Image: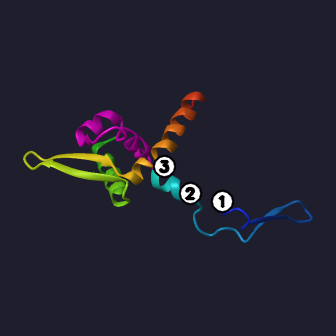
Amino acid sequence: MAPTGSIRIETDERGRKRSIAPCMEPCAIEKGMRLIGGKWTGSIIYHLKDEPVRFNDLVRMLGGASKKIIDQRLKELESRGMVIRNVISERPVAVTYELTAFGRSALDILEQLRAWSESNAVTL
């Protein structure tokens, strides 16, 4: 999707449609989906909504996700400025994760997605 007004669709004499000046980079929706749409990413953000959560507690909350994938997603979210990693003790190492203000800004979208999914009985 391109910003409004920057893309035109023309129809030729045979009824075929073609884009005039299409957007060649990801649109805003695609960028947002790449940021929070990865497998387990939205769920991780959602589970961090109330308070900092320890890594192993997050693993238990997510159920079907492996520790490896949760660790990868948390690192991605941290590098994107959505999550803060806090080391709370050295021996044994204990770490909590919490949302930044930027991470919190995604909660409304995720809540709407949750409600939409429930109200439409979405199944996979």
Residue 37: assigned label: 3
Residue 30: assigned label: 2
The quarter of the image holding the N terminus is: bottom right
Secondary element type, mark 2: helix
Secondary element type, mark 3: loop
Q: Establish if 109 lies above or below 21.
A: above
Relative to 2, 77 lies left or right? left
Q: Is residue 41 magenta?
A: yes
Quarter location, residue 24: bottom right
Of pointers 3 and 2, the one earlier in the residue sequence: 2
Give, as a single range, the part of the protein colored magenta.
37-64
Q: CA distance from mark 3 to mark 2?
A: 9 Å
Marks 3 and 2 close (CB-CB < 8 Å) = no
Residue type at numbered disc 2: Glu
Binning the other alpha carbons within 10 Å of mark 1 as few (below 14), some (14 to 19) or many (20 upward) gives: some
- Figure coloring: rainbow
The residue positioned 41% from the left and 54% from the top of the image is 102
Check disc 1 and report the residue beneath it. Answer: 1
Q: Position of residue 20 (x, y in %)?
A: 76, 70
Residue at the extreme left = 91
Residue type at numbered disc 1: Met
Residue 109: assigned label: none
Relative to 74, 122 lies left or right? right
Binning the other alpha carbons within 10 Å of mark 2 as few (below 14), some (14 to 19) or many (20 upward) gives: few
The residue positioned 88% from the left and 59% from the top of the image is 15
Q: CA distance from mark 1 to mark 3?
A: 17 Å
Residue type at numbered disc 3: Gly
Residue at the extreme front = 101
